[in-house]
Image: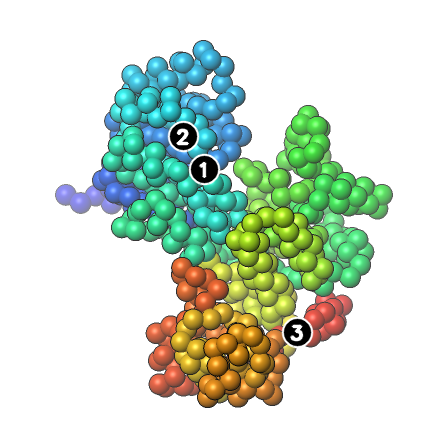
């Protein structure tokens, strides 16, 4: 007979092992997938509960689950928590003594270890490969899987070797997990791990309680103080690019009566940990930090995150601002942006390889366009992660500002025509050049001055056309090529639009920085 209180066996197990009553989001289906031995790809925002997706099946299945994780601190944290629950979990890394590492290896061989955490560097050691070959391994979990992709915000070359090692160990199911993956990064991960067949579990990244705003960086210290005063005595994180700037800003805030402390990797570790604890325990309100701060920090009531310098990518930006408002309450994310910061970031990489420099350039272009654009910030960020939302958020600076919009139907058609006539083989810049009739070397060498669309849009400048193309991407008429992300293609929706065009409003981008400054003054 049906009961109103049916408990699934998985739920019983969840209760028994972790003491939780309910699964969150997709956890249960994901776990079922892993128990069925299928390759699984999980994309879920930070704090949504990714770890449980492999921890519970690891406990339930026979043998040892290998968890590949990039940071020793994160590993230790998880192992401590699991051990506290009475689960046999260990890690193998360079911090272990000889006898400790021998014990871990012995218990793994004997099948006693349920979860074995390893850094990719340890995984690739011949000794360890031998050990794992001889052990009974249930499946492999790859945490922070975006490290596989050069487009991930913290690419780790040794992550690229994981698949080869797994193949040496045996034909094992893989669960890859990450909190930030653009469509390009996703494709890279699947390709590299050869798990194109995997089921993807993509959770929404929408955080309705985060209010985004961008200010042109003019007088940053004064702008910062003004902002913090609006959130007096609330917890906040200020991100700066350099250690020197961190010290300088923290000092400046203290002089101005704000209870702020610095945090960066150049500080002595006891002092750094002390400052982190002070922030967690509310002994200080504001932590001024480099991006070294925040990994694994679980403070629910961070009310604001300020980017004092432009972030390196929108992935990083979303990750860092995502540390605000974990408790679901309104929180504010403010960025001070200047094109000079972008040039500075490009210069940081001037000694790197051409590929790396190009990657950095593309990520920074996306970053800059986010700042310049008048489109709803939330919509832009979600679009970047491949998520389409119909409605504007209503509470970012762009939504609150009443900027002008115009019927873009004819201009969209013209942009689509240019993309089509250049045979979907070029990027935004070239398409803009064609539309405005700018005779660059590229235009000359491809004879693109002969195209029908050439110079058809000369009444507007390149910036305007870039805005049309980008808004067309957000609206799904155009899309980046998944393999070569600098190339723009027409989507099915775009083709449909050409056949049956309709009126659609686009917003006019700001005159940077004057117009945005005026907005922020209000
Ligand atoms: P992520 O790895 O996605 O950033 P975590 O795995 O660290 O997130 O989980 C975040 C928090 O949520 C942890 O404290 C975890 O114990 C808790 N959690 C995860 N799943 C559940 C659940 N089903 N019920 C209650 N708490 C959960
Ligand atoms: Zn908005």
How far apart marks 1 and 3 lie (CA) works out to 42 Å
Q: Is residue 490 above or below residue 255?
A: below
Label 3: state its secondary structure. loop
In the figure, is residue 364 to the left or right of 225?
left
How far apart marks 2 and 3 lie (CA) works out to 50 Å
Mark 3 — residue?
Answer: 510
1 or 3: tag closer to the N-terminus:
1
2 or 1: tag closer to the N-terminus:
2
In the figure, is residue 76 to the left or right of 299?
left
Decide: marks 2, 1 in contact (CB < 8 A)? yes
In the figure, is residue 73 to the left or right of 82?
right
Mark 1 — residue?
Answer: 158
Query: From this viewpoint, is residue 135 visible?
Result: yes
Q: Quadrant of the C terminus?
A: bottom right
Query: From this viewpoint, is residue 7 visible?
Result: no
Label 2: state its secondary structure. loop
Q: Residues within 10 Å of mark 1 (few under 14, many from 20)?
A: some
Which residue ends up furthest to the right in the rendered image? 255
The quarter of the picture where residue 496 lies is bottom left
Residue 57 location, x and y as percent? 30, 34
Residue 313 location, x and y as percent? 57, 54
Mark 2 — residue?
Answer: 124
Point 49% across, 61% down: residue: 384
How far apart marks 2 and 1 lie (CA) works out to 8 Å
Point 60% across, 52% down: residue: 312
2 or 3: tag closer to the N-terminus:
2
């Amino acid at each position: 007979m049906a009961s109103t209180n049916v408990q699934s066996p998985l739920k019983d197990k969840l209760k028994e092992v972790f003491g939780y009553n309910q699964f969150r989001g997709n956890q249960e289906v994901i776990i079922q997938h892993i128990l069925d031995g299928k390759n699984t790809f999980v994309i879920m925002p930070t704090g949504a509960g990714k770890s449980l997706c492999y921890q519970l099946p690891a406990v339930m299945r026979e043998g040892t689950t290998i968890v590949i994780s990039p940071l020793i601190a994160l590993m230790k944290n998880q192992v401590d928590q699991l051990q506290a629950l009475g689960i046999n979990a260990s890690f193998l890394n360079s911090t272990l003594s000889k006898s400790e590492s021998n014990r871990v290896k012995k218990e793994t061989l004997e099948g006693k270890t349920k979860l074995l955490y390893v850094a990719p560097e340890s995984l690739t050691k011949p000794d360890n490969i031998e050990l794992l070959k001889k052990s009974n391994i249930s499946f492999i979990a790859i945490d922070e899987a975006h490290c596989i992709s050069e487009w991930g915000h913290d690419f780790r070359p040794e992550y690229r070797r994981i698949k080869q090692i797994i193949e040496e160990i045996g034909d094992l199911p893989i669960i890859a997990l990450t909190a930030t993956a653009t469509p390009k990064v996703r494709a890279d991960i699947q390709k590299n791990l050869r798990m194109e067949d995997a089921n993807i579990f993509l959770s929404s990244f929408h955080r309705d309680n985060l209010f985004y705003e961008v200010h042109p960086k003019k007088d940053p210290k004064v702008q910062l103080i003004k902002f913090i005063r609006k959130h007096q005595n609330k917890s906040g994180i200020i991100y700066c690019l350099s250690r020197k700037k961190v010290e300088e800003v923290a000092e400046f805030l203290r002089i101005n009566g704000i209870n702020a402390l610095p945090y960066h990797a150049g500080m002595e570790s006891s002092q750094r940990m002390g400052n982190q604890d002070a922030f967690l325990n509310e002994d200080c309100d504001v932590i001024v930090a480099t991006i070294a701060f925040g990994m694994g920090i679980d403070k629910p009531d961070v009310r604001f995150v300020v980017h004092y310098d432009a972030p390196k990518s929108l992935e990083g930006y979303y990750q860092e601002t995502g540390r605000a408002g974990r408790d679901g309450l309104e929180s504010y994310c403010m960025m001070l942006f200047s094109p000079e910061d972008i040039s500075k970031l490009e210069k940081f990489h001037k000694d790197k390889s051409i590929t790396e420099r190009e990657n950095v350039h593309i990520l920074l272009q996306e970053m800059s366009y986010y700042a310049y654009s008048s489109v709803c910030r939330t919509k832009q960020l979600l679009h970047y992660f491949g998520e389409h939302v119909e409605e504007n958020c209503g509470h970012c600076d762009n939504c609150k500002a009443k900027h002008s919009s115009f019927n873009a139907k004819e201009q969209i058609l013209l942009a689509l025509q240019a993309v089509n006539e250049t045979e979907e083989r070029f990027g935004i810049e070239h398409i803009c050049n064609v539309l405005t009739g700018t005779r660059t070397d590229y235009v000359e060498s491809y004879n693109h001055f002969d195209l029908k669309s050439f110079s058809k849009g000369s009444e507007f400048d390149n910036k305007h056309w870039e805005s049309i193309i980008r808004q067309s991407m957000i609206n799904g008429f155009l899309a980046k090529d998944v393999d070569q992300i600098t190339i723009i293609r027409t989507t099915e929706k775009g083709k449909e639009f050409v056949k049956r065009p309709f009126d659609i409003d686009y917003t006019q981008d700001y005159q940077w920085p004057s117009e945005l400054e005026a907005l922020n003054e209000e």
